[in-house]
Image (cartoon, grey):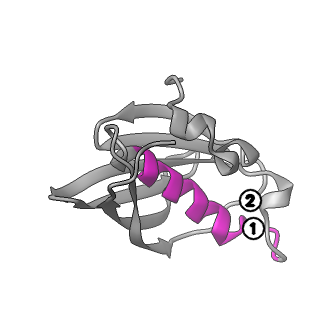
């Protein structure tokens, strides 16, 4: 496992959902999360918000590759198939374009068999904020 950066050490959602940082490289990140019972909806499948949270966190790691604070300007997700309690999801985020203060990142979420679960596209904006 990669050493956690401060942004993740202080990320309460990352911790609460039990996410793990697997890869942290400039413009690329891989995170994983095991689906727990409290992450499911009324149909006993993984709640879409949990899948989005994992993808969004991988996106955040991939686009914050230096000391500048970069945030989401928007994101879209397409759910491809459902998962259930006990499944391990992996989100792989990759930078597609970086132009000035904006970027586009694609995140693929897969199950333990490597089958795609969701596709996420995030649009980043680098701010003038100082890191906390």
Residue density around tag 2, few if under 14, some if 14–19, many if 20 or more, within 10 Å: some
Q: Main secondary structure of the magenta part?
A: helix
| Viewer-nearest residue: 3 or 31 | 3
Asked whether 8 falls inside the magenta stretch, the response is no
- Side (left or right) of 103 relative to 47: left
Q: Secondary structure at mark 2?
A: loop
Relative depth, front residue between 22 and 109: 22
x then y, percent, for residue 10 = 63, 39
Residue 98: % across, % down: 18, 56
Contact (Cβ within 8 Å) of mark 2 with mark 1: yes
Q: Earlier in the sequence, mark 2 or mark 1?
A: 1
In the image, 50: left or right of 8?
right
Image position of 104 (left or right of 120): left
Q: Looking at the picture, does residue 123 appear above or below residue 43?
A: above
User: Where residue 129 sits in the image (x, y, percent)?
Assistant: 39, 53
Q: CA distance from mark 2 to mark 1?
A: 5 Å
User: Which residue, given by chain and number where applicable, does mark 2 sit on?
Assistant: 84
**Magenta residues (range):** 43-61
Query: Can residue 50 be found in the magenta stretch?
Result: yes
Q: Residue at x 31, y 38 (%)?
A: 66
Q: Which residue is mark 1?
A: 45
Q: Quadrant of residue 85?
A: bottom right
Which residue is nearer to you in this view: 45 or 107? 107
């Amino acid at each position: 496992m990669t050493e956690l950066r401060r942004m993740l050490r202080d990320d309460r959602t990352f911790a609460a959902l039990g996410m793990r940082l697997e890869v942290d490289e400039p413009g690329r990140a891989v995170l994983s999360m095991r689906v727990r019972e409290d992450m499911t909806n009324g149909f006993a499948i993984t709640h879409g918000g949990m899948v989005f949270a994992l993808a969004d966190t991988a996106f955040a790691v991939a686009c914050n590759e230096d000391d500048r604070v970069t945030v989401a300007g928007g994101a879209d997700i397409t759910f491809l198939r459902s998962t259930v309690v006990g499944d391990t999801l992996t989100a792989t985020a990759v930078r597609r374009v970086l132009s000035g203060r904006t970027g586009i990142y694609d995140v693929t979420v897969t199950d333990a068999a490597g089958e795609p679960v969701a596709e996420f596209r995030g649009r980043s904006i680098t701010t003038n904020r100082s890191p906390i």
